Image (spheres, grey):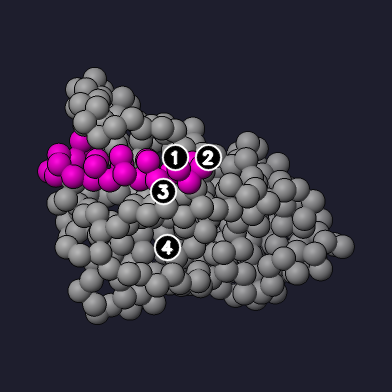
Amino acid sequence: MGVRSWTPRGWTASAVAVAVLAAAVGAGVVVSERLGADARVQDVARLVPADLAGLDVTDWESVRDRLGESGDGLVAAASDRDLATRSTLVSSDVVVAEGLGWSPRTVRWEAFVQTSAGTGLLVGLPESRSRTEARLRDVGYVESDGLWTIDLSDLRVDGASTPETFQQVRLLGDGVAVASSEVPVVEQLTAIAEGRAESLADDPTAARTWAQASALDVFALQDGQAGCDSTDPAESGPDIAAQAAVAVDAAGELRPYRWLVRGLDVSAAPTDEPDRFVVAMTFDSSTQAAEQAEVRSRLATGPFIGQTGTVEESIELTRQSVDDGVAVLDLDRQDGAVSLMAFAGPLVLASC
């Protein structure tokens, strides 16, 4: 199959946490200037810490548009194409949809973040701040100094149980909520939004990596250690590790990266074009990135080690490139492909 050109798209507004409301008094102006009421996925880089371990982003507004589905069939349609795998809201859909008015059918985007303080969820809200505050009150949340909390036993939604991550909530500006079971996480993300702490966007190396994710509808960003660990064939047992070692010996030496992105760009309905799967790895130099792009492209063929069938039956390499020290592999996702976003089993072409 020949290489196709893809036009980068800006992100249109897209574990376990709750909402966020009421920004701290005196910080509202700062937060609003950084975000605004129409904060988009691109803005997430300015809301999460530079030393994060992992970040899972789903641009639900774009997914709905691309799939041509926004009703009850959305989650099933997204799941069929591996687009709901990294979503926190999918697993919490009943509570969020019925209690807070949030679900994949309504929110603009979601971003689940793993920080040194713990885990939290950022959400691009579908409604105004006043309406979101009213919903929080209606289901049992109590506000104090801009922080909304709830005893899960007090949740006033019939037949629902709230994940612990939704216990603490704060609004950042007019259109973004942060939620977590841990107050330090909420405060850490609030400080970043207010400009009182460094964000991922302030790290030049991370910013180069982020640029590769900006054209994707769903992606996972990991630091080097987390990325290497999640793709490691050794985690699947000695037989898989031995198979991977033979393949790597033939392809060339794998060098560790600083950041790893893997994600999907959805082909718009009703096109027959396959979705695009992207693997991007940031290295210390463009020379090293070019070398690694070549080595890793050789691993995009043959038996899919740790999975079923061949690599080509799930993904087919269409292009390899280097951009400012970032090695990028563009691959077509084939019908019936194994889940590439579930992190189940190794991904040798992105391993270390």
Q: Is residue 218 visible?
A: yes
* Total numbered circles: 4
Q: In the figure, is residue 157 to the left or right of 130? A: left
Among numbered discs 3 and 4, the one appearing first in the sequence: 4
Evaluate if marks 3 and 4 touch, with contact meaning CB atoms under 8 Å apart: no
Question: Within the image, what quadrant is residue 24 found in?
Answer: bottom right
Among numbered discs 1 and 3, the one appearing first in the sequence: 1
Task: Please state which of residues 199 and 149 is positioned toward the viewer in this rendering.
Answer: 199
- Asked if residue 16 is among those painted magenta in the image, a careful observer would answer no
Q: Amino acid at mark 1?
A: Gln
Q: In the figure, is residue 127 to the left or right of 224? A: right
- Asked if residue 305 is among those painted magenta in the image, a careful observer would answer yes
Q: Which residue is mark 2?
A: 284
Q: Residues within 10 Å of mark 1 (few under 14, many from 20)?
A: some
Q: Amino acid at mark 4?
A: Leu
Q: Which residue is mark 3?
A: 327
Q: In the figure, is residue 157 to the left or right of 25? A: left
Among numbered discs 2 and 3, the one appearing first in the sequence: 2
Real-space Cα separation, disc 2 to disc 4, in angstroms: 24 Å
Residue 216: mark in rendering? 4
Question: Within the image, what quadrant is residue 305 found in?
Answer: top left
Q: Residue furthest left?
A: 309
Q: Which residue is mark 1?
A: 288
Real-space Cα separation, disc 1 to disc 3, in angstroms: 9 Å
Say above or below: 240 vs 349.
above
